[in-house]
Image: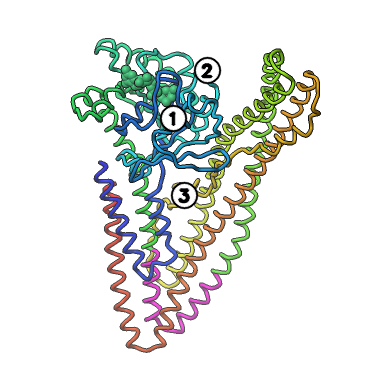
């Protein structure tokens, strides 16, 4: 499926949704939600690699504009998220929740090690919108700082974005033969990304022969880690794309197709495009179409029911309604079991995952940071006054703990969301059974044919949708000021170290408590939302059936003429639904 086909199918799908919204018998349908989902479903393509391999340059090259700053020294220190927008706009998000719009030329002041050393400006990330076809349909390109440089905090930031990746572009470059550090990092990337693309950048440095050798060397190195997965190229090695970000950018900005071709970026870009279409486009279209089909099949069933209640003998109808009501009561009673089970499962996540992970993280962090504190103390004590020493160490503790928690939280968040997703999936299957059972029951009772549309529901395809991810800033301000109070004005250096150690443990403990509270609360909210949505589905089904019968009955009481009119209206609506149904099947076939 090419991007143009995808766009076409997508707009046809949106057309179907619009038409469905205009049909009176389609009620309680998540059309709006689906529409939003189709429009905003995100796909994170994270660009990672050792420092200076050309990550930032490749992003600029793909977009065809020099938007992000590049340099010969370790540079990127903050992640930048490139997302689609009508114009180039830049927003800086700070850890305390502030957001500021900046001009393009100020970007280096926020995202580079030089302009924002050790992230003194407390930036969490930068969001750049840009009208590039690569970013259409929810694809986000994320530039991360390089790992392995002397700046440990840059490595930490990169790791923080790994859990968010749907696919990764792993950057290597010909001027730096792949080493052990690179392979170790790849190991970690593999844990998080379903798909990894390898780019061997700066190909312009080498002639054909040397480039071939470099590709060979890299392929062999990668094979060790990547194994020989079947989905790779025919010789079963990881495929490496040699590119030159420099030539690609030159070619695009200087309007020279020849230079662009020499860069070999277009080859990679077209492969990337088809991957995105396959992975993202196909899934989105199919899932959305399936859900609409499901909704239509239910609406058609309700129309048939109404038709029945317009025409069957009254007495028989009333008897059947009673039977249905009894069944409804049974289903309602089952709601309680659902609540209890869901509650238990959520608590289990907290106990078996969160508690254990947090305790281990807390212990390791205290041990590491205490050792670090002693080392720093020994270095600083010779050159500083007690006051400066205290201040410096205090800053050190705060920034380290903050950073460590930020990284840990992003990873833990992913773990919890996966666990919650698994639970949701299981419950969704049960709810689907209940809904289908209810429809089947009524179909038998009222003798109306009904094909339960057996397919994965919108909810189950991406149930992490329920998990409330919210990257909250790690606040340490309150704890910080309590230390100033606790320390007397004149104290010996030894005492400072002791107090600092106590302070460190205290800060970590308080942060752990906060993190625990925060995660538990979020899981609880996610659970409530999910519960509400699931119960609403059951209720909507029951209500749909009851309403259809009731409408028929009340029309009937208005006399023959009304019945005739309604019958005509029903067959008109059925015709429309039939038509949409056919188009949706076509969309599915084309995706
Ligand atoms: N010759 C050549 N140089 C390149 C190419 N791509 C990037 N460079 C240079 O390599 C250096 C590093 O590029 P960046 O894009 O800043 O690399 P990075 O991986 O983002 O670096 P960090 O963010 O510090 O990890 C810069 O001096 C670029 O001009 C290329 O294709 N060919
Ligand atoms: Mg960079």
* Spatial CA span between label 3 and label 2: 44 Å
SS for callout 3: helix
SS for callout 2: loop
Dominant secondary-structure state across the stretch colored magenta:
helix
- Label placed on residue 108: 1
Left or right: residue 232 versus residue 488 is left
Residue 237 visible, this angle: no
Q: Nearer the viewer, mark 1 or mark 2?
A: 1
- Label placed on residue 370: none
Residue 280 in magenta? Answer: no
Q: Residue at x 67, y 37 (%)?
A: 477
* Spatial CA span between label 1 and label 3: 42 Å
Across and down, in percent, residue 143 comes to 42, 31
Across and down, in percent, residue 543 comes to 49, 70
Residue indicated by mark 2: 150
Residue indicated by mark 3: 460
SS for callout 1: helix
Q: Earlier in the sequence, mark 1 or mark 3?
A: 1
Q: Nearer the viewer, mark 3 or mark 2?
A: 2
Q: What's the magenta region?
A: 298-327
Left or right: residue 258 versus residue 273 is left
Q: Is residue 104 above or below residue 448?
A: above
């Amino acid at each position: 499926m090419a991007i143009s086909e995808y766009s076409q199918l997508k707009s046809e799908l949106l057309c179907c949704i619009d038409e469905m919204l205009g049909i009176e018998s389609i009620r309680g349908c998540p059309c709006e939600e689906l529409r939003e989902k189709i429009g905003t479903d995100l796909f994170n393509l994270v660009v990672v690699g050792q420092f200076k391999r050309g990550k930032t340059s490749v992003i600029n090259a793909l977009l065809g504009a020099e938007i992000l700053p590049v340099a010969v020294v370790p540079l990127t220190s903050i992640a930048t998220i490139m997302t689609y927008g009508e114009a180039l706009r830049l927003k800086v998000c700070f850890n305390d929740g502030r957001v500021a719009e900046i001009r393009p030329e100020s970007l280096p002041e926020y995202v580079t090690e030089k302009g924002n050393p050790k992230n003194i400006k407390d930036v969490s990330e930068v969001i750049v919108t840009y009208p590039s076809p690569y970013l259409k349909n929810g694809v986000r390109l994320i530039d991360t700082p390089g790992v392995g440089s002397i700046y440990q905090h840059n490595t930490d930031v990169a790791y923080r974005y790994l859990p968010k990746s749907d696919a990764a572009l792993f950057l290597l470059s010909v001027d730096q033969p792949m080493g052990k550090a690179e392979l170790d990092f790849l190991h970690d990337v593999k844990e998080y990304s379903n798909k990894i693309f390898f780019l061997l950048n700066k190909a312009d440095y080498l002639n054909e022969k040397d480039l071939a050798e470099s590709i060979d060397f890299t392929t062999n190195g990668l094979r060790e880690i990547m194994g020989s997965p079947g989905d790779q190229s025919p010789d079963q090695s990881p495929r490496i794309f040699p590119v030159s970000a420099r030539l690609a950018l030159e070619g695009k900005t200087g309007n020279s197709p020849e230079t662009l071709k020499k860069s070999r970026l277009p080859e990679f870009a077209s492969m990337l495009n088809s991957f995105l279409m396959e992975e993202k486009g196909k899934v989105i279209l199919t899932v959305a179409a399936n859900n609409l089909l499901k909704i239509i099949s239910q609406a058609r069933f309700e129309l048939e029911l109404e038709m029945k209640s317009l025409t069957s003998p009254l007495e028989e109808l009333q008897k059947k309604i009673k039977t249905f009501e009894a069944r409804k009561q049974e289903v309602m009673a089952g709601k309680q079991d659902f609540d209890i089970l869901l509650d238990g499962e959520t608590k289990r996540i907290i106990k078996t995952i969160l508690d254990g992970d947090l305790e281990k993280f807390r212990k390791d962090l205290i041990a590491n940071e205490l050792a670090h504190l002693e080392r720093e103390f020994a270095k600083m004590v010779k050159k500083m006054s007690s006051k400066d020493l205290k201040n410096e160490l205090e800053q050190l503790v705060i920034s380290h703990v903050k950073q460590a928690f930020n990284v840990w939280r992003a990873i833990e968040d992913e773990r919890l969301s996966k666990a919650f997703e698994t639970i949701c999936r299981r419950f969704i299957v049960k709810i689907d059974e209940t809904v289908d059972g209810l429809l089947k029951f009524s179909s038998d009772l009222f003798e109306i044919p009904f094909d339960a549309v057996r397919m994965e529901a919108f909810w189950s395809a991406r149930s992490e949708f329920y998990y409330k991810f919210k990257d909250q800033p790690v606040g340490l301000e309150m704890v910080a000021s309590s230390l100033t109070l606790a320390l007397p004005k004149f104290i010996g250096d030894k005492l400072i170290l002791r107090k600092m150690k106590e302070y460190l443990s205290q800060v970590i403990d308080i942060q752990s408590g906060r993190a625990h509270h925060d995660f538990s609360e979020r899981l609880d909210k996610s659970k409530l939302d999910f519960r509400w949505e699931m119960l609403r589905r059951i209720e909507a089904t029951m209500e749909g059936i009851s309403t259809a019968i009731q409408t028929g009955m009340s029309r009937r009481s208005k006399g023959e003429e009304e019945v005739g009119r309604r019958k005509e209206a029903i067959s008109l609506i059925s015709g429309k639904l039939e038509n949409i149904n056919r188009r949706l099947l076509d969309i599915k076939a084309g995706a």
